[in-house]
Amino acid sequence: MNIIDFLFPKRCFGCDALGNYFCKICAQSLLVQKQICIECFKPSVDGKTHFKCQKKFSLDGFTSAYVYEGAIKKALISLKYKFAYDIAFELAKMVAIRLLEISFLFPDNSLIVPVPLYKKRENWRGFNQSEILAKELAKLIKYEHKIGLIVKIKDHRAQVRLSRTERLKNTKNIYKVLDQKGIYERNIILIDDVVTTGATLREIGKVLKMNGAKSVWGVAIAH
Ligand SMILES: [Zn+2]
Ligand SMILES: [Zn+2]
């Protein structure tokens, strides 16, 4: 046990038991998410965007591991506001297992890319939680991962305070690809922590595809 674990012992987000952020029992009782189409949010067997919902630069599909509630919600909120690398590590491990369970068939040369944060926000928090999740997930499922290919060039008021329509409007033209060669003809797995309207993933997916990405699949811990 290291000094940090001694001073701030890990407790289960579900039942408060000491040892891990998710004890075995709570980890098994988490509600897994049904797969949906990221355009219309209606069920889609394998998470593929419905054929009839596809637009020119739509995401090809979306996979979300858990329902955003209970212990998962607590873990994701803690991850956002405190630096807790171990939480990200445990979540990434659980999501990797879920992805393998949900017949997850990304092409071998897929590239894992995290949803970027606006720099100032990242500095204030000290880290981008999606970046940590992407890095850990990449290690576990053995795909290449890269950060800094795409950046957020414009901040906007915190999404949580906006209505759904305002949120949708608010995600236009705020992402920019920095390394076009890095994404050209690549199959991209785009990692986010929590998805609410899906507007962020759809917008980044569009920007990636407009810049030459071959396919883009969104992956979230929960929605
Ligand atoms: Zn527990
Ligand atoms: Zn649809």
Image: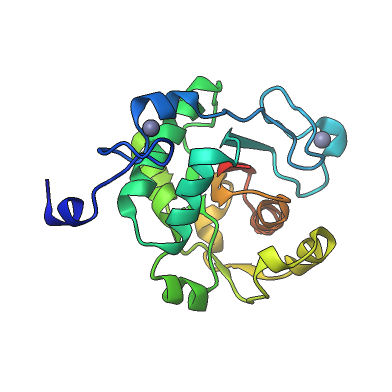
Q: Nearer the viewer, residue 13 or 106?
A: 13
The residue located at (42%, 33%) in the rendering is 94
Farthest right residue?
52
Q: Is residue 156 left or right of residue 165?
A: left
Q: Is residue 48 left or right of residue 112?
A: right
Q: Nearer the viewer, residue 116 or 5?
A: 5
Residue 163 image point, x, y percent: 80, 63
Residue 102 image point, x, y percent: 55, 23
Residue 88 image point, x, y percent: 38, 48
Q: Nearer the viewer, residue 220 or 55?
A: 220
The residue located at (68%, 50%) in the rendering is 196
On screen, 164 above or below 27? below
In the image, ligand 2 is in what quadrant? top right
Q: Is residue 143 visible?
A: no
Which quadrant of the structure image shows residue 160? bottom right
Q: Is residue 113 left or right of residue 210?
A: left
Identify the image quadrant of the N terminus: top left
On screen, 123 above or below 201? below
On screen, 174 above or below 98? below
Identify the image quadrant of the C terminus: top right
On screen, 133 above or below 182? above
